[in-house]
Amino acid sequence: MSEPGQQERRGAGGTAPDEAPGARDIWELLRELAPEVLGALVRRYGQFGACEDAVQEAMLEAVTSWPARGLPDSPKGWLLTVASRRLIDDVRSEHARRRREAAAAPPEQAQEPGSDRDDSLSLLFLCCHPALSGPSQLALTLRAVGGLSTAQIAAAFLVPEATMAQRISRAKQAIKANGARFELPGPAERPARLGIVLHVLYLIFNEGYTATTGASLTAPELSGEAIRLTRWLHRLLPQDPEITGLLALMLLTDARRAARTGPDGSLIPLGRQDRSRWDRERIAEAVALLAEVLPAGQVGPYQVQAAIAAVHDEAESMEATDWPQILGLYELLERLAPGPVVSLNRAVAVAMVSGPAAGLDLLHTLESDQRLAGHHRLHATRAHLLEMSGDHQAAVASYREAARRTTSLPEQRYLTGRAAQLAGGEKLCR
């Protein structure tokens, strides 16, 4: 016979406190369950904004109660129940009980048959609705699908929490105002909508891998979350070649993370990285993913970018890199997804194959492109190729201009340091 209070402390049949997982494990579980719970609520009650707030409150209660009381038998059912109660309480407090509760099932139904239905994919499409701005899509995806708090998202993007809260609030209002429907897009619309979803995940990863502003080169929470969400999407749609390609691209790129910075956080460019510090397990996993999809022949931009990253990651050194193959892949990528950044990267590959003068000639054609003309990467690339060509004086000027334009402090320090090293070498030669 149980001691008094023991059953209550076991969380309705769940694990006992001394068996309960740690706070980190609970947080990871909650982030996995968040999109499923929110999707179920939105499908049942509508009102995306109110449902999302209710799920966040339920997650906070779980974080405080589960470590002491133990995991419930059905963590998802527990979250559904608590979030449903919060939602109905809010409805009552707004004096809309009769109108709203007619459509709202009682909280006890949260664990009824059918609660195992996974609406996560519909939720992801809703968060990446075309009516939302790019920043709103990013923020809402991280909050609703990723389960991150507003404070965490604000910290990752280096903006005040109040600013991020307003951004998320506007996104919810835009979804309501545009009458966005909680459902998977039809076959005709799905490819374009999936493209937006993948682009949002790609942007989240890029911001995490190389932060656009701030004192740190990376924001690991963002890139890690992008990989987690892309893995999850790959499990939902395992046959989609571009989802597989994007996951492979993220893994191949993130595999270099440990070698990208020095002990003081300074930037180390690809050519000077200690490749023994690259994550070989991630590289092997990504190459295996590519081996599954590339033979199918439905090649898309993310698969090509992943193939380029694989050539880099499998090379023993910068000198041993198969640059002709990389150049050929960039030429293919320009046909599939033309853009100034692709052309900028192709210029580097051209320089490695045909010499820096050929790469600089290609850069001249990009200077009139307003999407790139003021970007620090154009000046940094020009500086690198000028340095390769031996024109150190011009390279110094370009490095300094690139440093002036970047908002990333580690990049700024690297570019400024490179300019100083070259300028010092020039003086010695004189």
Image (cartoon, rainbow, N blue to C red):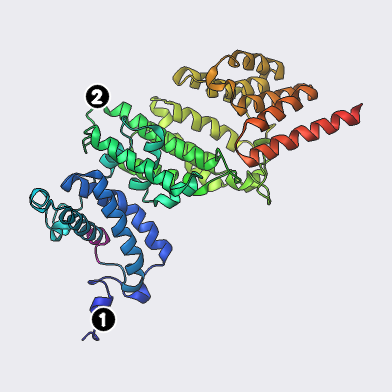
Q: Is residue 57 visible?
A: yes
Position in image of residue 253 (x %, y %): 54, 39
In the image, residue 109 above or below residue 142? below
- The residue shown at (49%, 47%) is 156
Position in image of residue 18 (x %, y %): 37, 76
Residue in front for this viewpoint, 102 or 330: 102
In the rendered structure, which segment of residues is drawn in magenta? 73-78
Residue 77 covered by magenta stretch: yes
Comes first in the chain, label 1 or label 2: 1
In this rendering, would 101 be left or right of 249? left
Residue in front for this viewpoint, 412 or 71: 412
User: Marks 1 and 2, Cα distance to the nearest angstrom?
Assistant: 55 Å
Q: Secondary structure at mark 2?
A: loop
Main secondary structure found in the magenta portion: helix
In this rendering, would 15 be left or right of 45? right
Is there CB contact under 8 Å for labels 1 and 2? no
Residue underneath mark 2 = 188
Q: Looking at the image, which residue sits at the far right?
A: 430
Picture quarter with the N terminus? bottom left
Dot 2 amino acid type: Ala
Q: Is residue 330 visible?
A: no
Position in image of residue 266 (x %, y %): 67, 45
